[in-house]
Amino acid sequence: MTAYAAIADMVSRFGADEVLRFSAGDGPLPETIQPARIEQAIGDASVLIDSYLRRRYAVPLAAVPQAVVRAACVLARYDLAQGGDREPSEQMRLARKEVIAWLEGIAAGTVTLEGVAPIAATGGARVQDREPMFSTDTLRSW
């Protein structure tokens, strides 16, 4: 599984204090960021992103646009903010809703990713025309 963001991306977007709080879960606040919980949330966000992208792009993405990094961070932050006695803030809910709408747009083809080539459309009916084996002229002698 390819992660579309790193802990450093989370820290640069949301601050070290917030990421530290999220890494603690329901336990006491640790001295340093505990990576396991953060990496799990980023991994889950990346899987969700792939589920939308695979309709139009080869996943996992080789070159990850910053918009996808941002989406992974927003989704991971929302997931980390849930649980125990915590609930995501309204700002987190709106940001997640915006990211999901953006991903739905990508899946529908109304939004494209810059710098990433979509896969060639496959499927659909293929029709090949050929001369008919039987016609009124060829069956006349029967």
Image (spheres, helix red, strand yellow):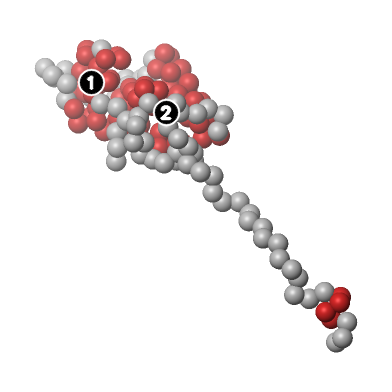
102 vs 40, left or right, is right
Residue 60 or 27: which is nearer the viewer?
A: 60
Type of amino acid under label 1: Ala
| Quadrant (top left/top right/bottom left/bottom right) for the C terminus | bottom right
Q: Camera-side residue: 17 or 47? A: 47
Q: Residues within 10 Å of mark 1 (few under 14, many from 20)?
A: few
Is 138 positioned to the left or the right of 65 in the image? right
Amino acid type, label 2: Gly
Q: CA distance from mark 2 to mark 1?
A: 23 Å
Q: Specify the label residue 113 is tagged with.
A: none
Numbered badge on residue 8? 1
Q: Which mark, by number, is residue 115?
A: 2
Element type where label 2 sits in the image: loop
Residue, x 35% and y 39% (percent of image)?
Answer: 60
Q: Position of residue 64 (x, y in %)?
A: 35, 29
User: Residue 100 or 3: which is nearer the viewer?
Assistant: 3
Q: Look at the picture and state if 89 lies above or below 2.
A: above
